[in-house]
Amino acid sequence: MRLTAEQVRAFRLRRQGLTDRDGTGPVDVARRLVGVQAQVPSAAAQAVAVRTATGSVGDGTVDAALAAGAPLRTWSMRGTLHLLAADHAPAVLALLASARSWDKGAWQREFATAAQMTALAAGAAEVLADAVLTREELTAALVAHTREPGLAEALGSGWGAVLKPLAWQGLLCHGPPAGTRVTFTSPRVAVPGWPGLPDPDEAARTVVPAFLAAHGPATPAAFDAWLLRGATPKARLRRWFADLVADGTLTEVDVDGETRHARTADLDDLAAATAPDPRLLGPFDPYVLGAGTGDPDLVPPAHRKEVSRAAGWIAPVALEAGRVVGTWSAEDDQLTVTPFTGPVPDLADERAVWSRVLGRVLTLPP
């Protein structure tokens, strides 16, 4: 089956709720996208709201869902905080844990030894078994449990480097919001009926098709870049895709000369996909992160630095035919688009959408 990059972008926009705005809330959106990046909470709220017909960043739906344990907020893809649907989270974490990136010598020299990580894992399982702790309380409890006072600085770091492996092993996640303070607990506390992590090969049978349903068609390398910046062992990655092709779940397709994988169930939708009107997306939007800013079908290579900025910031973007054609801002209630080249697309409808999402009336320049 031959497809164009424009068809692929149109398919992704519809599947991600950006064509019809048919998302029903944080859990539905997180499940569709296999996670919503939540490193910046306001960006996650925008990503959810813009995919619904009536949501806004101030409606409290994300905080209410987190308090109820669905979705889960934890370190996941690429080591960044995400909202994950509770039924997807065990499988996603199992794939991340299977790479065991913390076993690498370079990681251990920078952060913690293998013995220290083993002690931290045992400590987290015990101290978070039935508790919700602030970062300071968690640090004190783990230092006391491991008798490793030298770990206090790493445990207290806002980057969470030594906590991420604990999250990937399903031992730790973020607890309910406590004002401006971060809390931590166990997924067994946060999610009723938490089943633990499945076998990685079985988990791949859930995560790979779910990813392709929203972000496909894609190559195994693109999937791995989204998952863990290419850290999955290549033989294992190839086997996951080959097994899904063999049983008919996936089909190889041609996208402008490149072989990619799609869910077999999605082939008719891919063939019929047509691009919607121009769209505006907020910072760190999953539509951009799913493909990655290095995808030339999505972001013109000459303008990548305008989208992927210093300190890992992913800018709000304007789309035309699903491709990034500029960035935008909403300073002083004026919606200003900075196109890469050419004229600004017609954004009258998007002005109304983002007025609703941000909870303030935006105006377009004359």
Image (cartoon, rainbow, N blue to C red):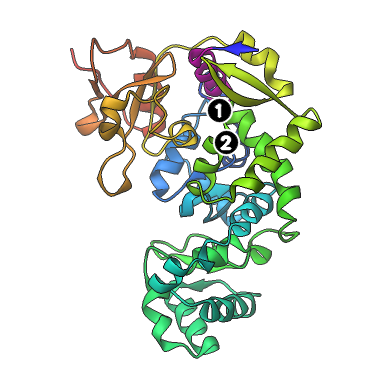
Up the image or down, 74 lies above or below 349; here it is below
Q: Label 2, label 1: how many angstroms apart (C-alpha)?
A: 6 Å
Quadrant where the image shows the C terminus: top left
Q: Is residue 50 magenta?
A: no
Up the image or down, 168 lies above or below 278; here it is below
Q: Is residue 239 left or right of residue 232?
A: right
Mark linked to residue 46: none
Q: Is residue 308 left or right of residue 70?
A: left
Secondary structure of the residue carrying tag 1 is: loop
Question: Which residue matches tag 2?
Answer: 33
Whether residue 85 appears in this view of the structure is no
| Residue farthest to the right, as pictured | 247
The magenta span reads: 4-17
Amino acid tagged 2: Leu
Marks 2,1: beta carbons within 8 A: yes
Up the image or down, 332 lies above or below 126; here it is above
Mark 2: give few (<14), some (14-19) or many (20+) Cα within 10 Å.
Answer: many
Residue shown at 59% from the left, 25% from the top: 260
| Front position in the image: 27 or 299 | 299
Mark positioned earlier in the residue sequence (2 or 1): 1
Secondary structure of the residue carrying tag 2 is: helix
Amino acid tagged 1: Gln
| Front position in the image: 160 or 280 | 160
- Indicate the position of residue 336 as horizontal and vertical percent values: 23, 24
Instruction: Identify the main secondary structure in magenta.
Output: helix
Q: Is residue 127 left or right of residue 133?
A: right
- Indicate the position of residue 183 as horizontal and vertical percent values: 49, 67
- Indicate the position of residue 138 as horizontal and vertical percent values: 49, 77
Question: Which residue matches tag 1?
Answer: 16
